Image (spheres, coloured by chain):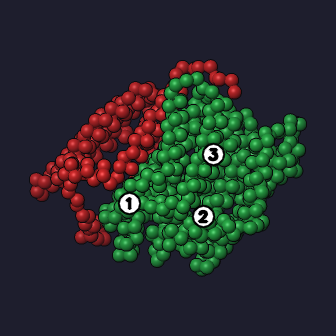
Amino acid sequence: MTLHGLIFYLLASVILASTGMAITRRNLVHAVLYLVFSFIGSALLFCLFGAPFLALLQVIIYAGAIMVVFLFIVMMVKPDLSEGTVLPLRQLLPMVLFGFMYAVVGVLVAVTDPAGRAVLETAVAKPTEFGHYVFARHYLAVEIISLILLIGLMGALHLGREKVPKEPEEPS
Amino acid sequence: MNWLLFTPEIYYLLVSLLFLGASMGGRATPGTDYIAALSAAAVGMAVTAAAVKLEGSLFAGSYRIDLLSQVFKVILSSALFLVLCICAQLNGIRERHRRDFYCLLFLCTVAMMMLVSSVHLISIYLSLELSSYSLYVLVALRKNANLGLEAGIKYFIIGIFASAMMFFGMGMVYASTGAGYLEELTEVLPGFVHDPLLMLGLLLTLSGFFFKLAVFPFHFWAPDVYQGSMNQVAAYIATASKVAAIGILLRVIAVLGEGNAYLIQVLAVLSIVSMTLGNLAAIVEHDVKRLLAYSTIAHAGYVLIGVLSASAGGYSGTVFYAMALLLMKFTVFLVVVQVASAGGNLRIEQLAGLHRRSPLLAMALLVAAFSLAGIPPTVGFTGKFLVFTAAMQKGYFTLVLIGMINVVISLYYYLMMVRAAYLLKPDEALPDLHLSLPLRTLTGALVALMLVAGSFPYPFIQAANAAVRALM
């Protein structure tokens, strides 16, 4: 095994473990922190694959901004932190079933055609070129995203406001 | 760049931003706001109709203006106008949320207009998201927070699931072909017919549209969301968002085109399952909106028959069906909104004695239900006829047969509604329903239009034919 491979498997196991922890924690703040680890792990993976820009974006956007928003949400909705298993058995069963099916299919694919591979073309672009491309060719998309964020804001305001202690129902 | 091509979208965007600004300041003035929204929608219809002949391409080719997109924009703007017509008594939401409501409705219409014009994977995905997100918030706006929030969250979770699958699929398509524009896809697709990665990618990409159209296996949200949202919002989801989904589905399927036997087979299976499941589930429903939701799922199946015929006849039949769906579904919802005037949900039993309380509404319900079931000479019959004929020409006999059997099954629950309105006696005497003069005119016009478009469909069929010529 090369050093490259060694680092890859090390990172992959860290990501898997921290994601597994994140989705099984009852305490949401702990879950968010584990998710940050997982995101930083994937950023390192991107770095390993030779995409430092993507890695930086991953850290800034996912591990940074989105996780902060998650923490805000956790503080805003004050979730019920009662003890108990995360998922009742009724919901766990289909999950296990589908996971098992996925594993079986994966093993079958690997066993029947060990040499099979799909080669995807890599595109290398500097951040400047990427920015030029996005804002010259796809500025409609950028504008649509800004509208989506606006609606997200309206939705969040609306949902947040509903939590305000009982205000008298307006006569209908 | 010719900004004139973008006029309808800019107009609707400006109106929605005005309502957004108004919602942030000033006291709520429901009467004035309603008049403003209604007239803005009426002007918008005129703007969209004036732009119907425009053609061109915008935003570095990712946005196409052609007759197909413009016809769908006209249908969408009429849908918005019609839905606003029944919003005079918005009992379902708080007074201070009314302006948000209008803002979101207009914004959602912009999104759907952009959706039917998009020809690049990214703009398709984003405009679909924009329209979905506005609908999530609209559903959750309901005053009865338990109903509205629950439906909104369910809609949101199923929606992001479908959208994640769609994005994953688009990633696969792009990874295997390197093509983002639909035109490029048309060129490279023949070389990739046996590429499993691409086929899987295409199927997953379609799942986003299936979610919008409530096709099996993305139909779970429909009954709960219809039940949980305000009657007016449910009407909007049942009409406008279905029309937009049909528009973009036509565009995408026209690209994947003929000769893609595998995809056609999958669509046929989905169509059969949707029809059968929707119709069978609707039989046992007693809540009118849930029933309509299942009927929507069944109708999505009929629409798919036209789409998968992948011929000029099939496509134009589908466009006709989209117009028919708007008319029939909207008329039923108009009745629902008027009968459940307090803004609550309506059970079939509550329709009892409707023909005494308001003969006009009862007749509208009768014609609309017959049209949904597909009984001549209504527009629903003509739509089904066109779609089934196109499928027969392609030799999909079994599919059409199953479709016909489903039509018979669906008769049962549509007649249940009619029976309640005409034959059942209410437990207690209910007061007469008085409609305002404009509303009476609108109801009469809708009934007349459903009958006229059913008996003399040629102008509409010609419009549909002209629209799909852009696809061939």
How far separated are the C-alphas under marks 2 and 3? 23 Å
Q: Are marks 2 and 3 in contact (CB under 8 Å)?
A: no
Question: Between residues A42 and B470, which one lies in front from this camera angle?
Answer: B470
**Horizontal arrangement in the rendering, residue B371 relative to residue B68 (left or right):** right
Q: Amino acid at mark 3?
A: Ala
Chain in green on the image: B
* Label 1 packing within 10 angstroms: few (<14), some (14-19), many (20+): some
Q: Secondary structure at mark 3?
A: helix
Q: Is residue A34 visible?
A: no
Question: Between residues B253 and B470, which one lies in front from this camera angle?
Answer: B470
| Disc number lying in front (1 or 2) | 1
Q: Secondary structure at mark 2?
A: helix
Q: Are marks 1 and 2 on the same chain?
A: yes
Q: Amino acid at mark 1?
A: Gly
Residue at x 59%, y 20% (from the top left corner): A167
| Disc number lying in front (2 or 3) | 3
Q: Which badge, 2 or 3, is on the more N-terminal residue?
A: 3
Chain in red on the image: A
Residue at x 67%, y 60% (from the top left corner): B324
Give the label on residue B61, or none.
1
Q: Where in the figure is residue B185, as x and y percent of width and height?
A: 38, 68
Q: Where in the figure is residue B451, as x and y percent of width and height?
A: 77, 61
How far separated are the C-alphas under marks 3 and 1? 30 Å
Q: Chain of mark 2?
A: B
Question: Between residues A149 and B73, which one lies in front from this camera angle?
Answer: B73
**Horizontal arrangement in the rendering, residue B189 relative to residue B233 (left or right):** left
- Residue highlighted by disc 3: B42
Tell me the quarter of the picture where residue B349 sits: top right
Give the label on residue B319, or none.
2
Q: Amino acid at mark 2?
A: Val
